[in-house]
Image (tube, rainbow, N blue to C red):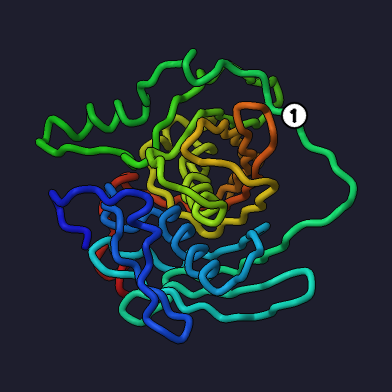
Amino acid sequence: MGNKGAPTPSLLDLLDLQDVGSDYFRSRHTEPNLSGALFGGQVLAQALRACLFTVADRPVHSLHGYFIRPGAEAEPVVYQVERTRDGRNFTTRRVIALQNRKAIFHMEASFHDGGEGISHSRAAPVVPGPDEVSAEDPFERAMHDAFEPNGEVLKLLPLVERRMIPLDVGRREAEGEARRLLWMRAREQGLSDDALRACGLAYLSDFWLGGVAKILHPDAVRQKLTSVDHAMWFHQPTDPSQWLLYDMESDWAGSARSLARGRIFDRAGQLIASVAQEVYLFPGQMHEAPRRGDLIA
């Protein structure tokens, strides 16, 4: 697992967990990452997948997770699910992700099959479509320029296809606003049911969100960051292999932390999900590998 030079697993591979009994599930694959630590979206998606194996016929509507330690890509992750509640209207699960018997992440997830009631939804911003913006990722280009001369071949999350919308599109004149919009989709056509698609959307939700605060701080562009927590609300099902618009903004940064919010829309302009995340920023290169002690302590 996590061998350099090995083929990158597909999103379906990542979601193919092994049931080892007593509501424990183990990852069969982990995704290589530039830092040597697990991508948070992978852990979110796998944790949700583990919960869904224990829930009958109710879709997820929210999750709240905390990243406790960075995970090592070379090690399998074991997900321990606790069946907290099976109620008349809601089902609740708690899951702990473990490596070497130590917690690296924990999450609460809630499941609800809907009902009649009031309805409203925020409109999507008016932006160029994915075919109208460049397919080149400026962030990945900058990494290429910085690392390729040293003989390193780097690819930022090859399972995600994205199109960055120019910074001046949708920009408001609000003081202290850090905002970025992008189109994204999973490079995976086999997400055949709503449970797999929800896990795929959770995977995508962690892409780029934590870094949006850096838009106001160009000098911090290479500053290392790590996710502290991640919350997500699923409003309606969607296929994450189709283009989705991610509208991200950070209202606050301070005390070495930053809070970001995101809204995910489909191409028809429907609000699919809402996301919030806090990250910790600390000195060091963004893609500097964590100290080994960080991965196992």
Residue 176 coordinates in the image, percent (x, y): 65, 31
User: Under tag 1, what secondary structure?
Assistant: loop
Q: Residue furthest left?
A: 151
Label 1 environment density (alpha carbons within 10 Å; few <14, some 14–19, many ≥20): few
Question: Looking at the figure, which quarter contains the N terminus?
Answer: bottom left
Please determine whether, in this image, residue 90 is positioned above or below residue 125: below
Horizontal side, residue 231 vs residue 39: left or right: right
Residue 271 coordinates in the image, percent (x, y): 69, 37
Q: Which residue is mark 1?
A: 123
Q: Quadrant of residue 83?
A: bottom right
- Along the viewing direction, whichever of 275 and 138 lies nearer the viewer: 275
Q: Amino acid at mark 1?
A: Ala
Q: Residue furthest right?
A: 118
Horizontal side, residue 1 vs residue 206: left or right: left
At 39% from the left and 42% from the top, the residue drawn is 188
Horizontal side, residue 197 vs residue 7: left or right: right
- Along the viewing direction, whichever of 53 and 25 lies nearer the viewer: 53
Please determine whether, in this image, residue 80 is positioned above or below residue 288: below
